[in-house]
Image (cartoon, rainbow, N blue to C red):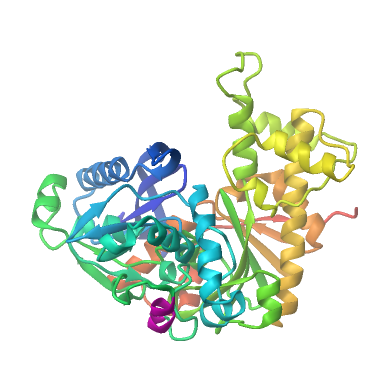
Amino acid sequence: MTETVAAVDLGATSGRVILGGFVHGKVQLRHVARFPNQHVRLHDGGRGGLHWNITELYRSVTSGLAQALREDSGVASIGIDSWAVDYGLLRGGRMLGVPYHYRDERAADGVEAVHAGVSPQELYARAGLQHLPFNTLYQLAADQASGMLELADRALLIPDLIGYWLTGREVTEATNASTTGLLDARSRQWDTDLMARLGVPSDLFAPVLEPGAGVGPLLPEVAGEMGAPAGLGVTAVGSHDTASAVVAVPTTDDDAAFISSGTWSLVGVELESPVLTEAAREANFTNEGGVDGRVRFLKNVSGLWLLSESVRTWDGPGATDAQRTSDLSALISEAGAVTGPVTVFDATDERFTAPGDMPARITAWCEERGLQPPRTRPETVRSILESLAQAYATTIERAERLSGKQIRTVHVVGGGSQNTLLCQLTADRTGRPVLAGPVEATAVGNVLVQARAAGVVSGSLEALRHIVSATFEPVRYTPRVR
């Protein structure tokens, strides 16, 4: 490959460093490093707080980048994406404490405090953000109650924090900033009036930077440790991983919905401007920033987290070797062979958000409603996948109604595009063709934005998607008669 860039893609359970380049107008990816991202529980004033092991994550990132530079000394840029909403607090450039995990229960404590000052209706009219109890503004309210916020002079979202340690530059990338609840949905700038009313310092977050802009060169000591050439720097990409994934949806048609399918499922459509109606708020849709000023009008739906947590429970410390479920593909195949009806539960119920025994929670949900819970592991998996597919169908129908956009096809990108049973069930329940792939959509979108900034490729967002279409041929799933 020539003219390569390095994509750092950080997920909730693992991270990767991937080299991306172009051969004959097609994207070429090469995985260089993969590492776990495991949360940790710490004793926090009498309770077990859930945190990100951020320093180990940073060590893994720099180690992976060093390996990438050993394999290809011509790397022109580095781009970083991750999950949304979480952040580190700093004072004088030094981190205060360990960043909390969005699944930590403390965030819920901030909801009441925020709504006491600003109504949910006004919050939505200003930021257009879906209500999730772990949104950044609620976490900041929890920090405020604990006294941590008054100690901080800066908050950096996770990819911006990693970028700060690499470059020494403090910025807030726009697509991730849009998930805080503190960004004006129309101007894509900080809503300082809202911050003042919530007691958040107006300069707590760094200035907003759009995808494609340069963050800055690597610090000399960082470059030396990684063996990086002089001048190598970080470029802002769609640092919310879904923003990068949507760049790599292989279509320029205006009648397509997308599902970015992984730990979470992000289901929606791309628009030119936000939808800030009361109907959209009541439906709990969000208006998140996209690349090139686009809006990702979508809803967070619990994703393959339900499946991974179920497997984690089945493979827990008390399980024997015979009871463990190491072959997930075999389990999904068995789920596909289930012929009898299974209960479809509400995959968006907040009880399924926190870590824990997911099969037991599904059973409890069913029993509370007098419904038959799944009896076997294959039935549980089938119930999860049917429930996700139904949640997708309901969300797509609402997105169509709220946005006024007619949806004829559904594109599934990310890890979930490999789940053939889920893709087929999605086609069945939506009644629309499903086009699955690319699997590495987030890394592809990350690479494309960097490459355009470096002049390796050019053109509009649609031009970038033409490159994706030329590189990856999606797998088509046609709705079956039910």
Is 268 above or below relative to 91? Answer: below
Q: Is residue 365 left or right of residue 447?
A: right
Please tell me which residue is depicted at 76% across the width and 52% down the height of the picture: 346
Please tell me which residue is depicted at 24% across the width and 41% down the height of the picture: 63
The segment highlighted magenta reads 190-197
Is 58 above or below relative to 25? Answer: above
Q: Nearer the viewer, residue 298 or 433?
A: 298
In the rendered image, residue 194 lying in the magenta stretch gets the answer yes
Q: Is residue 219 visible?
A: yes
Where residue 185 sits: x, y (%)? Answer: 49, 81
Please tell me which residue is depicted at 70% across the width and 73% down the height of the picture: 282
In the rendered image, residue 81 lying in the magenta stretch gets the answer no
Please tell me which residue is depicted at 58% across the width and 31% down the height of the picture: 312
Where residue 149 sits: x, y (%)? Answer: 33, 62
Q: Is residue 103 visible?
A: no
Quadrant containing the N terminus in the rendered view: bottom left
Is 274 above or below relative to 74? Answer: below
